[in-house]
Amino acid sequence: MDKVEQAYAVAKERYGEVGVDTDAAMESLRRPSLSIHCWQGDDVAGFESPDSELSGGGIQVTGNYPGKARNVEELRMDIEKLLDLVPGSHRVNLHASYGEFGGKRVDRDAIEPAHFTGWIEWARRRGVKLDFNSTYFSHPLAESGYTLAHGDPEVRKFWVEHGKRCRTIGAAMGKAQGDACIHNVWIPDGEKDYPVTRYRRRELLRESLDEMFAEELPAEEVKDAVESKLFGIGSEAFVVGSHEFYLAYAVSRGKIVCIDMGHFHPTEVVADKISSILQFVPELLLHISRPMRWDSDHVVIMNDDLRLLGEELVRSGRIDDVRLGLDFFDASINRLGAWSVGARTTLKALLAAHLQPLARLSRFEAEGNNFARLALTEELKSLPLGAVWDYYCRTEDTPVDGELIEAVAEYECTTLSRRV
């Protein structure tokens, strides 16, 4: 028995003393799949042209660490390495700007499933499934700060067509993989200062979305989600697609609500929204990120926000109805390292939630014994989560925590450092 197994044996006994079956917890962790965002690998630049770069849309990536993916082949290589470092079976989330355009300029209102055939075939070979996002930033027709809520009907027409084509691409992905592709819509539309046309802008957005979603596509192939935001760079005073707007739109139109952890006020507890929204919708999409003072998309770590999120997902009993997507980007450190830490930490937070004696805690609460509930909750924080996590990683043939740094460093030495 090696050190990982020895530590797990002790942890299993210790958790058993408080009524937790660690084997069952690990089995529960195998069910959910993370939808891993491709854009961490190249700083959200995409591959529409050789000099593609992120611009506009209230999004900013800081840092210039060497070794970013410069083309689709390198990005896939990095994602494959990432999947070897993250335990479990996961999905890959693409933006429309990551198609294979053959060196030709293909505008957003002209993209087709053919531009993503390579991704579909790659996913089939690698045994992963794909999700998709329309791309409403880094484009001349988004420079005004408006897209689907633009005052010019011709600009709105362009972006509506883009959305329609993205839905078709998502459906092609879903059909090929035998599982619905989640197509998510986020737009940057908003104002730096206070507008006088709030109602009209939201009316335009509603009309544009209705037109975009007018065609009924098979739910087994593609499902549409809409993502809100509180504010962005250049839209500090007003965002058209607010939480209230998209929540009402999704419920009334049968769409999925997307909740991004960075798209709310810093004092809001995103985990608290889950139990409310799931009362009225069949499923939910989460974008897991870490805001720091603003929607800064820092790498996910085990902070209180993530712990609370994991706990609410497990305690609600609806975790199977929640799609879990990652959405952060950090160019100041090794990009594979950022990816792997964020993905692994998200799973670790779910494991921590599964390692809680929910029946016992619920009983204390029902009895009004709030002291016992509090004491047990605090006791759980010092139990050997890491030992269970390492054992889970070992059973999934992925590095334990103590091996991750070396694994990333080796890939940097053999692959990333040669991208000059």
Image (cartoon, rainbow, N blue to C red):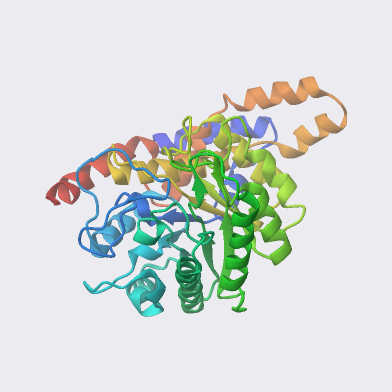
On the image, the x and y values in percent for residue 85 come to 36, 49
Residue 36 falls in image quadrant? bottom left
Residue 188's spot in the image, x, y percent?
Answer: 48, 51
Looking at the image, can residue 304 be seen? Answer: yes
At a point 34% along the width and 41% down the height, the residue shown is 330
46 vs 391, nearest the viewer = 46
Asked whether, in this view, residue 348 is left or right of residue 84, the answer is right
- Name the quadrant containing residue 372: top right
Q: Nearer the viewer, residue 264 or 326?
A: 264
Q: x, y percentage for residue 141?
A: 39, 61
Vertical order, 124 against 34 (above or below):
below
Query: Residue at the spot x=21%, y=71% of the render?
Result: 103
| Count of numbered tags | 0
Question: Closer to the camera, 22 or 302?
Answer: 302
Q: Is residue 135 above or below residue 259?
A: below
Side (left or right) of 292 relative to 223: left
Instruction: Residue 38: name its quadrant.
Output: bottom left
Q: Which image quadrant: the N terminus? A: top left
Residue at the limit of the structure toward the right, as seen here: 367
Res 399 seen here:
no
Image location of residue 9, percent across then percent down? 52, 35
